[in-house]
Image: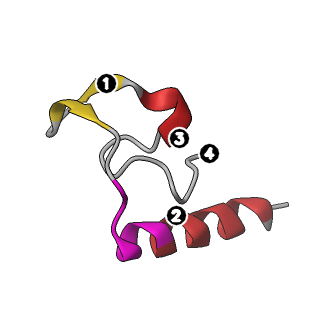
Amino acid sequence: MINPSGCRWCGVDQREHAQRWKAPAGWHQWEQPTQQQIKDRMNARRTERNRP
């Protein structure tokens, strides 16, 4: 499950990130997610938690 505050491009937590590769960003360092990404990730987490 992706942390809502994880990297904008790959979802990895900031302290575990270092440098990663992910399309379309390519090699990148941790970037703050957008407010919409945080909201979407929180909703996905809530939906997953409520599944039987």
Where's residue 25, x and y in %?
16, 39
Lower position in the chain sequence, tag 1 or tag 4: 4
Q: Residues within 10 Å of mark 4 (few under 14, many from 20)?
A: few
Q: What residue type is labelled 4?
A: Met
Numbered tag placed on residue 41 in the rendering: 2
Residue 20 is marked as 1
Q: Quadrant of the C terminus?
A: bottom right
Q: Do the residues labelled 3 and 4 touch (CB within 8 Å)?
A: no
Label 4's element? loop
Q: Dot 3, how many residues are within 10 Å of its Cα: few (below 14), some (14-19), or many (20+)? A: some
What residue span does the magenta drawing correspond to?
A: 32-38
Q: Which of marks 3 and 4 is nearer the N terminus?
A: 4
State how far apart marks 2 and 4 are (Cα).
Answer: 9 Å
Type of amino acid at the residue the image marks with label 3: Asp
Picture residue at 54% right of the left edge, 34% below the top: 15
Q: How far apart are marks 1 and 3 (CA)?
A: 12 Å
Residue 2, percent across and down?
A: 55, 47
Mark 1 and mark 3 lie on one chain; the one further toward the N terminus is 3
Q: Distance between the residues labelled 1 and 4?
A: 18 Å
Q: CA–CA distance between discs 2 and 1?
A: 20 Å
Q: Name the residue under label 3.
A: 13
- Coordinates of residue 49 in the picture (x, y in percent): 78, 61
Amino acid type for the residue under numbered disc 2 = Arg
Q: Residue 39, labelled with which disc?
A: none
